[in-house]
Amino acid sequence: MSDETRDSPDSTDPSREAGDPSPETVVETASEAAEGLVLDRYKQSQLRDFDVTVSFEDGVLEVDVYVNPPADADHDPEVVADEAARTAREAVDELFGE
């Protein structure tokens, strides 16, 4: 998909204004921000499992982060998951210039 297509307003979405990022761009930005924070706190090889799920529908952003590090990890997984979700929301706010 070209950047021109991705960044053009979606005529089927009345809530989207010209110049707003596409839903795909919003989801990608949020996912990358959350994953980046998790991988900043833990080495990828150290994690048993982690998952970032992002949706953006009707102007509502939902971010769920699951982190399963080893028991002796330096960081609390709940704190890291909350921080990752918050970082994802902040990245999307920056996309919209807020």
Image: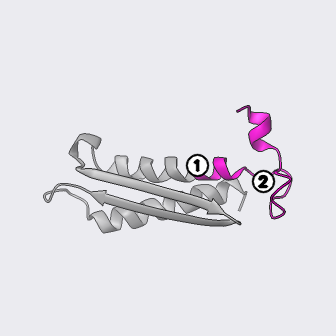
**Quadrant, the N terminus:** top right
- Residue located farthest toward the left when viewing the structure as drawn: 72
Q: What is the number of the mark on residue 95?
A: none
Eyeballing the image, is 40 above or below 5?
below
Q: Residue furthest top?
A: 2
Q: Is residue 9 magenta?
A: yes
- In the image, what residue occupies the spot 41% across and 67% down? 82
31 in relation to 65, above or below: above
Main SS category, magenta section:
loop
Amino acid of disc 1: Thr
Horizontal side of 93 relative to 84 (left or right) equals right
Amino acid at the residue labelled 2:
Asp
Q: Please state, as top left, top right, bottom left or bottom right, where the C terminus lies in the image.
A: bottom right
Asked if the residue under mark 1 is in contact with the one under mark 2, i.e. CB atoms within 8 Å, the reply is no
Q: Dot 2: within a 10 Å radius of its alpha carbon, few (fewer than 14), some, or many (20 or more) residues?
A: some
Residue 81: name its quadrant: bottom left
Asked if residue 50 lies left or right of residue 1, the reply is: left
Nearer the observer, 2 or 94:
2
Instruction: Indicate yes or no whether the magenta region holds residue 72.
Output: no
Q: Residues within 10 Å of mark 1 (few under 14, many from 20)?
A: some
Secondary element type, mark 1: helix
Query: How far from the left and from the top, in percent, is residue 28?
Result: 57, 47
Q: Quadrant of residue 45?
A: top left
Considering only order in the chain, which callout, 1 or 2, is on the residue closer to the N terminus? 2
Q: Secondary structure at mark 2?
A: loop
Q: Which residues are magenta?
A: 1-28
Query: Residue 63: image x %, image y %?
Result: 50, 63
Residue 68 on image: x %, y %:
25, 57
Q: Which residue is mark 1?
A: 29
Residue ID for mark 2: 20
Q: Residue 52: percent from the left, percent from the top? A: 43, 55
Q: Foreground: 62 or 12?
A: 12
